[in-house]
Image (spheres, rainbow, N blue to C red):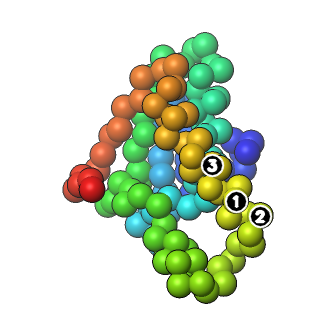
Amino acid sequence: MALENLKDIHYRKEGRVAIATLDRPQRRNAQSNDMTEGLISIIKEVEDDDDVRVMVLTAADPWFCPGADAVNQAARARGEQTQEGPAKRIQYGRMVNDFVPTLYNCARPVIGAINGMAAGG
């Protein structure tokens, strides 16, 4: 995904700092397929940019990110039709499998600037 086509994420550089801001307020920044694809693209851009020394991942207030968008996941689990077809679901599954290792193995430090409550499970 080209960085100029990002959906629900803003990307900018301030000096040697790359900043990715999740901005999907209608779903409290729940991570969509497009956001996952966009984050992978941003991480690859950061790694390829010798001027960038660190990446900050944050979100527009008031929430950071609850994780994946559970609405589509729940619909699929119930066997309901979603907006995406089987090929898109397979593509998304592969992206999700790539996202965590891509973030973890990023050649630059990634700082999570968490706004709001942070909880895990």
Give the amino acid at mark 3: Met
Q: Residue at x 63, y 48 (%)?
A: 95
Looking at the image, is mark 1 or mark 3 nearer the viewer? 1
- Whether residue 19 is visible, yes or no, is yes
Side of 3 where 100 appears, left or right:
left
| Residue position marked by numbered label 2 in the rendering | 87
Work out whether residue 8 or residue 101 is closer to the camera in this orientation and state it: 101
User: From what the image shows, is residue 48 above or below residue 69?
Assistant: above
Q: CA distance from mark 1 to mark 3?
A: 9 Å
User: From what the image shows, is residue 110 above or below residue 74?
Assistant: above
Q: Residue at x 63, y 19 (%)?
A: 49
Pointers 2 and 3 in contact (CB under 8 A)? no
Q: Quadrant of the N terminus?
A: top right
User: From what the image shows, is residue 113 above or below residue 46?
Assistant: below
Q: Residue at x 55, y 42 (%)?
A: 99
Q: Position of residue 26 (x, y in %)?
A: 47, 72
Q: Position of residue 54 (x, y in %)?
A: 45, 22
Q: CA distance from mark 2 to mark 1?
A: 5 Å
> Residue 90: which numbered mark, if any?
1
